[in-house]
Image (spheres, helix red, strand yellow):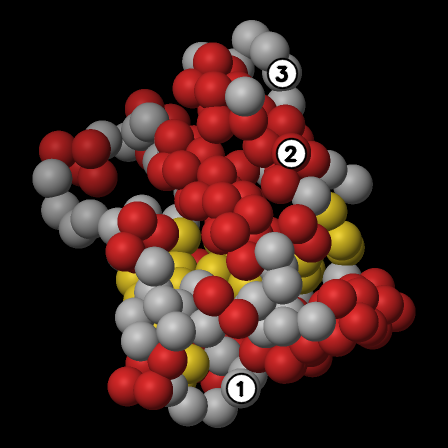
Amino acid sequence: MLLEADLSRLILIDYQARLMPAVHDGAAVLQNALRLARAARELGVPVWATEQNPAGLGPTDEALRALCDEVVPKMGFSAAPQLLPMLEAAAEPAARPRGGNARSLPRHLRQPQPVEPERSTWLLAGCEAHVCLLQTALGLLEQDGDVWVVTDACGSRTERNRDAAFDRLAAAGCELVTTEMVLFEWLGSAEHPKFKAVQALIK
């Protein structure tokens, strides 16, 4: 199974000012999160971020925050309770317009209405991998979510904790991927109109 941009939502967990300096290889983790968010912007993928106790850990990295559609503050380690109602609301189909000439046409002459695909893939990246990212991913899995975790855009203060999180996430049923996997699967082909823009994020 490959990722599809039209079915994806990108959720960025707690890339916050006072946390990132303590994360192992934090600069590279943040750089990959920025690549993901920029590619998502190019390809029309919604981007949400969470902030754990923002009064204590500060705001989301400024450059990353600018690429997000919405930032969700939280105090619980899992963001699933805040995210699930928003994800469900975003998946609801838009109400059909009432009245107008099109509805007065005979049924066989009406143009079919385009159907927006339901975004069913939750793509997660963030910090700390063994706490907030892990608990959010498991919470989404409990709701039968299709959860993918971008490993090279995730971090913890120690490698041991990060790697233990990946082992547990894989065992629970998450798909583990890398930033480049995501970007090339979203594109699908070198003929994609956004190929050069997204490829430039990798070079």
Where is residue 171? Give x, y as percent.
Answer: 88, 69
Q: Earlier in the sequence, mark 1 or mark 2?
A: 1
Looking at the image, is 179 positioned above or below residue 90? above
Quarter-wise, where is residue 191 in the image?
A: top right
Give yes or no for contact between labels 2 and 3 (Cβ–Cβ under 8 Å): no
Q: Could you say which disc has been placed on residue 115 in the image?
A: none
Mark 3 falls on what kind of element? loop
Q: Earlier in the sequence, mark 2 or mark 3?
A: 2
Q: Earlier in the sequence, mark 1 or mark 3?
A: 1
Q: Which residue in the protein does label 2 denote?
A: 180
> Front-most of 191 and 114?
191
Mark 1 falls on what kind of element? loop
The residue located at (47%, 66%) in the rendering is 21
Looking at the image, is 46 positioned above or below residue 49? above
Tell me how far mark 2 sits from mark 3, CA to CA. Answer: 14 Å
Where is residue 65? Give x, y as percent.
Answer: 30, 56
98 lies left or right of 174: left
Mark 2 falls on what kind of element? helix
Q: Which residue in the protein does label 1 denote?
A: 77
Looking at the image, is 80 positioned above or below residue 162? below
**Which quadrant is the C terminus positioned in?**
top right
Q: Amino acid at mark 2?
A: Glu
Quarter-wise, where is residue 85 in the image?
A: bottom left
Q: Which residue in the protein does label 3 denote?
A: 189
Categorize mark 3 by other alpha carbons within 10 Å: few (<14), some (14-19), many (20+): few
